[in-house]
Amino acid sequence: MSDQQDYNCIIIGAGIQGSFTAYHLAKNNKRTLLLEQGSSHGQTRIIRKAYEHDFYTHMMEECYLLWAKLEAEANVTLFRRTGILVKGPEDDVDFQQFRSILARNQVPTEILGPEEFSQRLPQVNLLAGEWALMDTTAGVLYANRALRAVQRVFQSEGGVIKDGDQVTDIQPGSTVTATTATEVYREESLVITAGPWANTLMALHWTTNTTTVVMINVCYWKEKVPGTLDISSRNPCFVQLGVEGSQYHFYGLPSNEYPGLMKICYHMGSETEPDESDQQTDRTDVHLLSQFVSHYLLGLEPEPAVVERVCTLSCCLQVTPDHHFVLDRHPHHNNIIIGAGFSGHGFKFGPVVGKVLCKLSLGQMPSYDLSPFKIQRL
Ligand SMILES: Cc1cc2nc3c(=O)[nH]c(=O)nc-3n(C[C@H](O)[C@H](O)[C@H](O)COP(=O)(O)OP(=O)(O)OC[C@H]3O[C@@H](n4cnc5c(N)ncnc54)[C@H](O)[C@@H]3O)c2cc1C
């Protein structure tokens, strides 16, 4: 057991947000400890500027720069540009919001009318009244590789990672105490970036908690005729809005995890507890996806070839009611910082989320308006 102050800051959770927070703290010459209980992560994540809120599009400007900086520092490719197709009924509110935000923020965008669309993507069904936009800046992030890269740079800056070290208790105070099975740490500040487990940790010193954890079935789909729709080399990622009977959007990525199989998912799943998610057997999202694929992606078999649902972390999301993040100080304990509620779209923001959480833990003013991310709104 050690109870002297060895570090300036402890971070709980070495996912992308905790790892980037650690990276920025180490670059600010802070002695930083990153604690991880042990987990797995997905291989690919979409990165895009196309959003339905300006503040996310603004943050993405800096994210792209910082991802490129990490690629250079770690000497590794983390991003493949594919573009992203945003498709939906022209009168859909979300679709209009995407369109005006792309235009207002001068994001390089192509507009595909019905004729051009069917020429470029003949296997994809553009329904009557639908339009499509292409955010040409978008693409795929290699998530596992990115996580390893940011942790490697953090360690090269003197940072320490302890894997297999689960924090079981936090005691607030002028120094914060974090307890694991083998150690008791007392440090100036603490950052909680525990993903789906954030609720468990926050429940220790929390008043209300309205975030939920959901498990999604990650589905991979096979082409009817190999090579006709495989979007691995030619075609973009996509977001489909405004599908009748579905509250949330569908999205897809070029094949990567399984050769020739496209990853297509629904942006919502079934409520669960992170440690009990293997008991969640609901397949509502798979059913919605099958319907979606058979109506919109005519070149694919309408049943998934692979469904990843053994709940590893790569299938679980922590969701806030408004689907916006939590980036804030604990309301009663200034030296406890929370990065949570990434609601299934946080990976791409890792570099800027980490910078914001770093600034909060140093008592500095972040350069973004954090009002959409305040914990009090929950
Ligand atoms: C299927 C799927 C697809 C997605 N697609 C996209 C996408 O296309 N684009 C995008 O931007 N985002 C996407 N996301 C969302 C994105 O992956 C998450 O928002 C992001 O990974 C959250 O990162 P995090 O660091 O907050 O959490 P996590 O990655 O969940 O990391 C939290 C870490 O904390 C550790 N931990 C928890 N409790 C403790 C404890 N007590 N002690 C020690 N360690 C602890 C956990 O083991 C875990 O490793 C997707 C998510 C899923 C599940």
Image (spheres, rainbow, N blue to C red):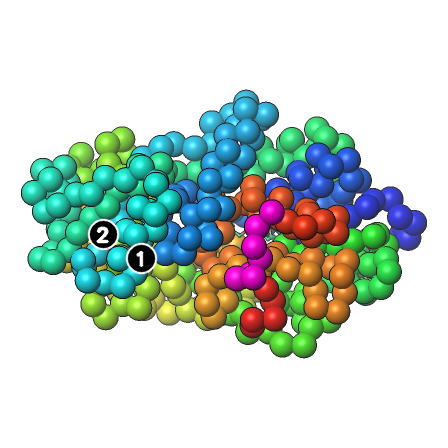
Residue 141 lies, with reference to residue 165, above or below; the image says above
Residue at mark 1: C-beta within 8 A of ligand 1: no
Q: Is residue 173 above or below residue 313?
A: below
Task: Give the amino acid at mark 1.
Answer: Gln
For the record, the magenta segment spans 367-373
Q: Residue at 65% x, 31% y: name it.
A: 153
Q: Which residue occupies 17% across, 51% down?
A: 131
Mark 1 Cα-neighbour bin, 10 Å: few <14, some 14–19, many ≥20 = some
Badge 2 marks a residue whose secondary structure is strand
Q: Return the mark for residue 57.
A: none
Is 71 within the magenta? no
* The C terminus - image quarter: bottom right
Q: Return the residue at label 2.
A: 87
- Where residue 103 appears, x then y in whole percent? 30, 46
Looking at the image, residue 259 sits to the left or right of residue 78; the answer is: left
- The answer to whether residue 370 is magenta is yes
Residue that lies at the very extreme toward the bottom in this rendered image: 207
Residue 284, position as x, y percentages in the image: 32, 68
The residue closer to the viewer here, 138 or 273, is: 138
* Residue position marked by numbered label 1 in the rendering: 97
Location of residue 209 (image quadrant): bottom right
Hey, which residue is sitting farthest front in the picture? 104
Measuring from the top left, give residue 73's x and y in whole percent. 59, 25
| Secondary structure state at the residue bearing disc 1 | helix
Earlier-in-chain disc, 1 versus 2: 2
Q: Residue at x 49, y 61 (%)?
A: 324
